[in-house]
């Protein structure tokens, strides 16, 4: 029941990630969904859910971080998402410092609306790169690899690329509803081109690492990479001004085709 509750979170919030996780073998699929549920709830706290309920978001985030970090010490929780997360943490030996870095970035969203390049790098490390590293812990549990550094670099690159694509997709909404400007107050076509070129380079680095992953998870990660590469390509050809009012997406039939192609290529290589 707890695992299914966590799976519902990803199904409701992200069709792309939900589709990609279906390509993962069990138990990795279950563990990734359990991780996603925990970080998604934290994201909701800072994106307005707590405030809309007339709760203090800072207090809610502090309390939730304490619960998430403490949960793995116990084998029963009345909150099914925390119960599922605790089991995943123990089974995959998740590094607590990664989750602490994640919450630090979430906390920045409560007080900061603009970022210097250095601050943005720190933010993206905590909000996205460590998610890639925790997924890697899941994929490589009970497995040793001489290519661990390459895998870690690829995991961070993939997380960073995903985050930047999401920033560009949500540019207008982040600015209007949350007052956030991750790439500064003015995104012109030159800056957008620089960003999308950088994202492509990160996705290329990630592809090299995907080939080194266990076959049981390679297809799912490759599918997620392919979906975000498609989004990045569409953003690259969309005028910067249009991104202020339009959220770029990929039609479902195209997602299915990209997923199938990426899985076939990754698992037959």
Image (spheres, rainbow, N blue to C red):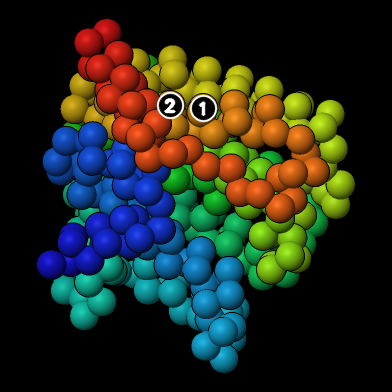
In the picture, the quarter occupied by the C terminus is top left
Q: Is residue 39 left or right of residue 8?
A: right
Residue 262, image x, y percentages: 33, 21
Residue 66, image x, y percentages: 43, 73
* Quadrant assignment, res 150: top left
Residue in the image at 32% along x and 47% along y: 18
Q: Nearer the viewer, residue 246 or 26?
A: 246
Q: Nearer the viewer, residue 30 or 141?
A: 30
> Gap between marks 2 and 1, in whole Å?
5 Å
Residue in the image at 30% along x and 14% along y: 265
Residue 229's disc is 1
Residue 21, image x, y percentages: 28, 41
Do the CB atoms of the residues marked 2 and 1 lie less than 8 Å apart?
yes
Q: Is residue 32 left or right of residue 40?
A: left
Q: Is residue 92 left or right of residue 249?
A: left
215 in relation to 114, above or below: above
Q: Nearer the viewer, residue 123 or 246?
A: 246
For label 1, the crowd category at 10 Å Cα-Cα, with few meaning under 14, some 14 to 19 and many 20 or more, is many
**Residue hosting label 2:** 226
For label 2, the crowd category at 10 Å Cα-Cα, with few meaning under 14, some 14 to 19 and many 20 or more, is many
SS at circle 2: helix
In the picture, the quarter occupied by the N terminus is bottom left
């Amino acid at each position: 029941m707890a695992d299914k509750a966590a799976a519902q979170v990803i199904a409701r919030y992200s069709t792309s990630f939900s589709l990609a996780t279906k390509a993962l073998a069990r138990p990795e699929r279950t563990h990734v969904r359990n991780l996603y549920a925990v970080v998604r709830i934290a994201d909701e706290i800072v994106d307005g859910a707590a405030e809309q309920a007339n709760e203090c978001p800072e207090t809610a985030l502090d309390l939730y971080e304490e619960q998430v970090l403490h949960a793995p010490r116990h084998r029963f929780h009345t909150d099914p998402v925390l119960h599922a997360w605790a089991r995943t943490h123990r089974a995959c030996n998740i590094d607590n410092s990664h989750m602490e870095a994640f919450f630090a970035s979430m906390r920045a969203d409560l007080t900061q609306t603009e970022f210097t390049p250095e601050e943005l790098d720190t933010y993206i490390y905590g909000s996205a790169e460590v998610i890639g590293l925790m997924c890697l812990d899941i994929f490589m549990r009970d497995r040793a690899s001489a290519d661990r550094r390459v895998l870690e670099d690829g995991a961070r690159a993939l997380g960073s690329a995903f985050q930047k694509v999401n920033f560009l997709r949500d540019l207008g909404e982040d600015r209007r509803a949350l007052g956030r400007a991750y790439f500064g107050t003015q995104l012109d076509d030159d800056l957008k081109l620089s960003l999308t070129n950088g994202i492509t380079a990160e996705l290329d680095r990630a592809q090299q690492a995907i080939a080194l992953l266990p076959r049981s998870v390679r297809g799912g990660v490759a599918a997620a990479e392919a979906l975000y590469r498609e989004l990045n390509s569409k953003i690259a050809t969309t005028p910067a001004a249009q991104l202020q009012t339009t959220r770029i997406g990929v039609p479902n039939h195209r997602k299915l085709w990209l997923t199938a192609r990426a899985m076939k290529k990754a698992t037959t290589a």
